[in-house]
Image (cartoon, grey):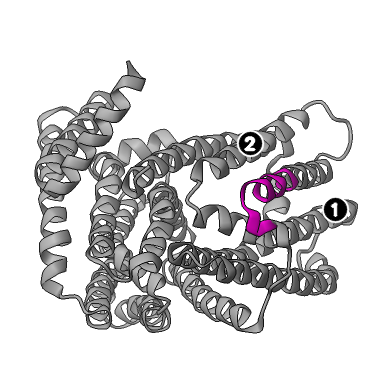
Amino acid sequence: MRQSTRLIVNSAVTYGRMLVTVGIGLLVTRLLLQTLGVSEFGLLMALGASAVLLSVIRTALTTSGTRHLAYEIGRGDTKALQQVFASSLVVHLIMAVGFLLLGVALMPAIIAVAEIPADREVAAWWVLGSTLAGVIVAILMAPFYAINTAYQEIPIRTVFELLSRLLTLAVVILLQVVSTDLLATYAVMSLVAIIVLESVFVVVCMWRYPVCRQGIAGANRSSARDLVSFGGWSVLGSMSVRIRMQGMIFLMNVLFGASVNAAYAIAVRAVGYQSQLIWAMLGAIKPAITTAYGKSGQSQAVVDLVHATNRFSVYLSLMIFIPIFFEAQLIIQLWLGDTPPFTPLFVRIAMATSLVTIASQGYSMLMSARGQVRGITLISVSFQIGAVGIGWVGELIFKTGPEGFIWSIFVVSCVWSATRVIFVTKVAGLTVTDYLRCSLLRIIAVCAAAYASGATIHYTLEPGYRRVGFVTLAAGLCTCITIWVLGLTEDERNHFRRVASKLLPYIK
């Protein structure tokens, strides 16, 4: 199977997985809230918040492992691949022990600070202990998920992630018939389900990838140091994004009150769902770029894949963005019912901000493939934290209000995306003209067509569900046509024709 064909299949599989998992996640949240009740659900979320922070570190180290493993796979160096995997296992074992000791030491303080009612302390201990154990399992599993991603065998991981979501749904359904403490039972049953499923995944990896059978044999300090260094910069970049998001939420609450803050929190959640669908595709592309770079260096094929990443990220996002941009009021009402003021505006601006940012995302992936993440991470951190500062100063001095506050994020993101292009082109020996010709002009053409089609329907029909449906249909159809005519290169069109011709007999 050609690399590009595999990439198309992996992207489609991953995107489908995300659609299913997001839907199951929404259902699980609804059922869990109904089953546990508001107070118990809030307690579960509060005690599990620490796992979210730790997951950032785990994800960063997984990204580091995937990059180094994919690079060695591209080079075809089996010995180096074994060293990287073994070193990754050692790093994650040390990390797991460290978090276990830290978690055990902090658990009494977390229970005390959380101000848990006396009659719920036992359940809280079960939840916190299960959360910590789940984090440890996830850390230990990271090298196995990294090797699976590096080999670009996404369907295997997709099966296990779908099984994980279905097991979570099954646990929630079982809560309807148990007579024990629901909160503690949910925490323990979820942990058991995770351990069983992840154990099976390890067995599959050991059967599928010989490198997994060696354990920690072959680990060396140099590979471990490279993994930790790359992962450290990834952690810094991820944390800066969370600082920007949480900082904006905090300032929104301080400057404008809880109602405006709630509107922004809804916008953040909407962008989160948008990002999950986009990263479903990017997660398949990233190891492909790294493997190709390891195989042939910064070849024209790698550069073409980088530009394709910039373009396809935006194309996919437009399918979601255009209907919400024009019909945000009704769509949000269908989703959540009554919402605070500013919610539709905040959602539109936040999703537009995401659109601008991903228009140069391929360049970040190129720097990751090259192993040069320090510079671009420092620039990203500066812009992420700067967005919070600019919004705050703008309100204090110019009284820009909530709209101006969130518009500042959009403006800073535009500058950040442009800066990323300029920085990467200089470091990687590319030109800004290449970005304009191969990425931006095609993106603008597709965006203009999608916007025009959505606007035509929006301003022609009366408000209502019928208009939402027609805007979605027209924007999707026009976007697809424009992508084919203007958004793809001739080589890409020819390749899609070849893939379609190969798949057609199976469809028949």
Residue 120 as seen in the image, left or right of residue 247 = right
Q: Main secondary structure of the magenta part?
A: helix
Type of amino acid under label 2: Leu
**First-in-chain label (2 vs 1):** 1
**Residue 344 seen in the figure:** yes
Q: Within 10 angstroms of label 1, few (less than 14), some, or many (20 or more) residues? A: some
- Rendered-image quadrant of the C terminus: top left
Label 2 sits on a secondary structure element that is: helix
Q: Is residue 167 above or below residue 270?
A: above
* Picture quadrant where residue 160 is located: top right
Residue positioned 69% across, 46% down in the render: 41
As helix, strand or loop, the secondary structure at mark 1 comes to: helix
Residue 340, compared with residue 106, is above or below; it is above
Name the residue: 41% across, 49% down. Answer: 270
**369 or 194, nearer to the observer:** 369
Residue, disc 1: 126
Question: Given this view, does label 2 or label 1 mark the residue nearer the observer?
Answer: 2
What residue span does the magenta drawing correspond to? 198-212
Residue type at mark 1 is Trp
User: Residue 305's quadrant in the figure?
Assistant: bottom left
**Location of the N terminus (image quadrant):** top left
Q: Which numbered disc covers residue 355?
A: none
Q: Nearer the viewer, residue 222 or 391?
A: 222
Place of residue 32 in the rendered image (x, y in percent of width and height, measured from the top left): 67, 38
Q: CA distance from mark 2 to mark 1?
A: 24 Å
